[in-house]
Amino acid sequence: MVGFLFWLLTLVPASLFALLLYAYTRRFSHRKELIRSLLTNSNAIGKYSVAFRASVDMRSEEWRRRLDLDIEAYLYPIALSTVLTFGAMVVLISKYSQNALGLPQPLLLFVQQTPTAALAGFAGAYLWSLYDFTDRFRILNLPINALHGMWFRMALTPIVACFAQALIKDTFVPMLGFGIGMLPVATVMSWVQDTARQRINVNAGKEVEPLWEHIQGLTPDIIARLIEASVTSAAHLANQDPVSLLRRTNIEWRNVLDMMDQAILLTYVGPALEKLRPMGIRGAIEAAILYGRFKTSAGDTEALQSIEAFAGAIGVKPDVARNLLHNLFEDPQVDLIWSLWFDRAAVPSPKDQEVNPEQVKAPEALPAPQPPLILTQPAAQPGGSIG
């Protein structure tokens, strides 16, 4: 009977990951239906067919893939986390009890040789993984990369803790191992790589700058969420599907659009983007509006002077600047971002995720958005600003 209770004790910590995933999928399905309901009534669905060749039928298999969680992809890291936790609990109980689990003697002798630093490192990684999972449940943001990071952290930290014990040789190494388990995986990997490079005298390769610092509103937490969603640079951000990005990161909807708007222009002008903000151009939509004014009013002196100032700020000739602005003006991604920004019946912010889809107002009950400019072909061209 005692042995059964100890085996049950090993299963409880391991089962928490599966239970949390089940609770997460139940809560996520509620928000998915809200997004589906609002997008069905949205004026922006047609823009998706142009920008991402998406179906206009929200019931299609394509939209199901866009909105649903890929449960099969989640099961693999959850299974690995469960197995690692179960194995660690077997080692922990067997090492500090009188073989309460009834392991064979050869296996028991092997288990008892496990360094304390390794167990402490695993404990830190496990507790941090549970905290991270619970926090992601709260904000409804659980990318698959995060789950893979959890099991990888639990597998990596015991090894790194033993590595640190061999280097430091201090009596406080178990506590250090516990702390290592709570560090980000990237930080732990970077420390191991830097230590190895110093030992064998190898220089690190040159990395391409992601240019995050040139986009307003990107806090370390937001950047971490983007990287977890496999968005590793401003150029990647500029080409994202905004609805898919909302689903993967759960960042405030208007912040998603604003960041993408800035990122699109950043891919064209680089760090010179910061010189354009005092001119009233924060992103691609404002730049496209400038070209729209130039195109519809050839005698608009203000537009001509603004284009010349734009050219001077980014260090090109006015003709080159007009070509750049023309490309932005006809870019379907820019048109989609504008449409979603002003379409009040489009995707909700995460704050609305607890609202029942039946309570969402139909678009007829909402005032139609008014673009600040009337262009020659407003249905196919941008006409608003995010700034």
Image (cartoon, rainbow, N blue to C red):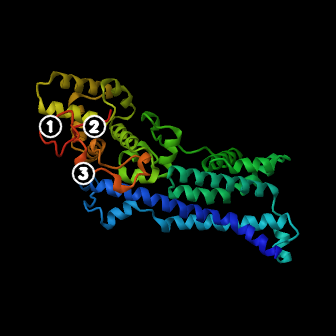
* Neighbourhood count class around disc 1 (C-alpha, 10 Å): few under 14, some 14–19, many 20 upward: some
Q: Residue furthest front?
A: 359
Which numbered dot is residue 47?
Answer: 3
The residue shown at (78%, 66%) is 91
What amino acid does circle 1 point to? Leu
Q: Are marks 1 and 2 in contact (CB under 8 Å)?
A: no
Look at the numbered disc 3 and give the secondary structure of its residue: helix
- Lateral position of residue 352 relative to residue 195, left or right: left
Q: Position of residue 203 (x, y in %)?
A: 61, 43
What amino acid does circle 3 point to? Lys
Compute the Cα span from label 1 to label 2.
14 Å
- Lateral position of residue 198 relative to residue 245, left or right: right
| N-term mark: 1 or 2 | 2
Q: Say which quarter of the image contains residue 110.
A: bottom right
Which numbered dot is residue 140?
Answer: none
Which residue lies under the disc numbered 1? 375
What amino acid does circle 2 point to? Ile
Which numbered dot is residue 285?
Answer: 2
